[in-house]
Structures are given as C-alpha cells and as structure tokens.
DNA sequence: CGTATAGTTTTATAATTATGGAAATATAGA
DNA sequence: TCTATATTTCCATAATTATAAAACTATACG
C-alpha cells in the first residue's frame, strides 16, 4: 500500500530535506505553498512573484531558497508564460516523515505510529 | 490520547529540531542513541566517550553537537560518575513528526496519516 | 522590433555553523 | 592529595549559508 510519489530516502536526501525545512524563511515558503496546494495537477501552486508578495521576501532571496528547496525535492515548479508556478511536494514530506520514523527512530518509534492513529 | 512527553511545538522549536537533525554527524549521533535506547528510564543511553568511539568523532566536536542537540531537545543526559550518559528523546521526535504533519502539511497530509497506518 | 514584466543568476558581504587542538573542569580511586 | 579518566569549554580557523542590489534572461504584447 505504497503511496504515489512516496519512496524510501537515502540518508543524504533526508538531510537535504531537513535542511530545506530547517530555516524560518523556507518553512514559511513551504507552508504558504501547502496553503495553496490542490490535489489536482495543474491547478494549485503559486507563482514566485505572489509568493514574494505574500511573504514579503525580496525576489533574489526567494529565488535562492526556492532553488534550495527544489534541489531537496520539497517543491516543484512549472513554467507558465513568464511566471514560474511553485508547488509543495507533499509526497516528499511524506517520505521524510517515514524516514524519520523508520530509519531514524528505528523500531523504537512504534509509539509514534500508535499516536498517529488518533488522527484517523 | 496524548502521548507522554509529546506536545505541540512552536515553530522555532520545530526549526531547532530540524536543524538538529539536518547534519550528517548529528543524524549519526541520534541514530546511535536510538540503537541504544530502552523504554525504561535509567537503563539505556550511551556515555559521550562511547559515542565518540562508536562514531569516531573527536570529543570536542561531539560535545559541540550534543550541546546543539540538547538545546533542540533531541537528546537528554544524566551524569553518572565522571561519565555523561546521553539518550535519544523519542518523544521529541514524535512531537516533530506531528508538527510536520499537522502544522506544515496542514490538512493536506491526511494521505500521510493514511499511509502511516500500514505499519500497524 | 521595443518595452514592460517575471524570474533567475551574479556578486559582494555578512552571519552562522563546523572542526578539532589545547586548556580547563569534574570526579573516581590510589 | 595526587593522578588518571571523562567531558566540556575556549579558541582559532575553515566552510557553509543567507541576504539583497545589480545585472541578466526569457517571454508577452504593442
């Protein structure tokens, strides 16, 4: 019952993702993109400029962080005219969470999964 | 059905934890501590020296990272004679995962929780 | 074409983080 | 008390990361 897009991460990939989220500006970016996420392809997301406006970040700074986050796989983008639409990659977040629970907590985190279940 | 030690994190706490794990040496440290974790208080954990040996890290470097990780709440320690025994804080990891799913993925990560359930 | 718009890259600079030797601190045991 | 052991702090240095102005690239549209 593997989720679409979710996969086992290498350690270096997990570290890249963790770094990708471990910074205030980038975490704000990610959250803003999640807010504008839709399950359907080609509908959600935000162009860089709107992100910059929403979060009040100078565009070169934003661009720097988005590049970082793309590299880490946390976001993806598609060009649309002269805009570039960015989207949060939720499958990546899912992979990261799985990595943390399975490959970092080892067997020791059964209790985490236990706890998760209260959300169902 | 709140887990013992698990609690809702502030954003800055989550960022500290993410940074605490987003580095190769520190992730190795955390994993080594998880390997040596026991649910019972006062039994598991590793003294700094054994950690240094196991991971082949010079003690000042190790100390630097352990301090960082303590500050982030990822590990805790207790003195025992001249040793300092370090333990992974699994409840903290649990809080972090919850934060990622609930406060970073927003509602959009139902599917993650869905996916978790296959582990039960 | 020319021009405005959207975004990225370049570049310089500042700030933070990582590394490990040397010195300092703390405790156990002779 | 003296010595060995365990760990941390201090310190200098190197490496990485963050910031944003200025320059550049690409596209739309007249």
Image (tube, coloured by chain):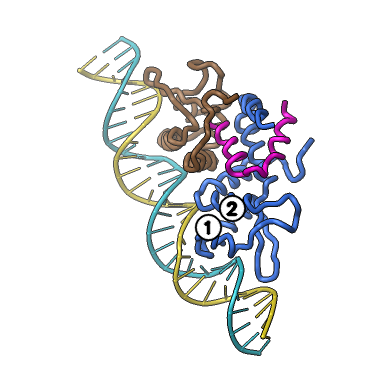
Chain colours: A brown, B blue, C yellow, D cyan
Closer-to-camera residue (B117/A119) = B117
Q: Which mark is residue B32?
A: 2
Whether the residues at callouts 2 and 1 have beta carbons within 8 Å, the answer is: yes
Compared to B90, does A89 lie above or below? above
In the displayed structure image, the side of residue A93 where residue D24 appears, left or right: left
Q: Residue at x 52, y 19 (%)?
A: A44
Name the spot of residue A11 as percent of width and height, x first: 50, 42
Q: Chain of mark 1?
A: B
Q: Secondary structure at mark 2?
A: helix
Compared to A47, does A72 lie above or below? below
Closer-to-camera residue (A97/A36) = A97
Quadrant that contains the N terminus of chain A:
top right
Q: Secondary structure at mark 1?
A: helix
Q: Residue at x 44, y 33 (%)?
A: A70
Q: Residues within 10 Å of mark 2 (few under 14, many from 20)?
A: many
Q: Residues within 10 Å of mark 1 (few under 14, many from 20)?
A: some
Residue under label 1: B55
* Magenta: main secondary structure: helix
Residue A25 is at least partly visible in this image:
no
Closer-to-camera residue (A29/C29) = C29
Name the spot of residue B93 as percent of width and height, x first: 65, 44
| Between discs 2 and 1, the one toward the N terminus | 2
- Taking the magenta stretch, the answer to whether it contains residue A113 is yes
Q: Which residues are magenta?
A: A92-120
Q: Residue at x 56, y 19 (%)?
A: A38
Name of the residue lying farthest toward the right: B1
In the displayed structure image, the side of residue B119 where residue D29 appears, left or right: left
Compared to B96, does B40 lie above or below? below
Q: Chain of mark 2?
A: B
- Taking the magenta stretch, the answer to whether it contains residue A119 is yes
């Amino acid at each position: 019952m593997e989720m679409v897009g979710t996969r086992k991460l290498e350690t270096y990939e997990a570290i890249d993702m963790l770094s990708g989220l471990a910074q205030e500006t980038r975490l704000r970016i990610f959250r803003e993109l999640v807010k504008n996420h839709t399950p359907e392809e080609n509908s959600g997301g935000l162009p860089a400029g709107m992100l910059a406006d929403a979060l009040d970040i100078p565009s070169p700074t934003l661009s720097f962080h988005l590049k970082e986050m793309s590299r880490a796989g946390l976001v993806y983008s598609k060009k649309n005219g002269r805009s570039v639409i960015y989207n949060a990659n939720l499958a990546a977040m899912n992979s990261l969470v799985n990595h943390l629970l399975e490959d970092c907590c080892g067997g020791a985190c059964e209790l985490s999964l236990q706890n998760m279940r209260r959300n169902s």
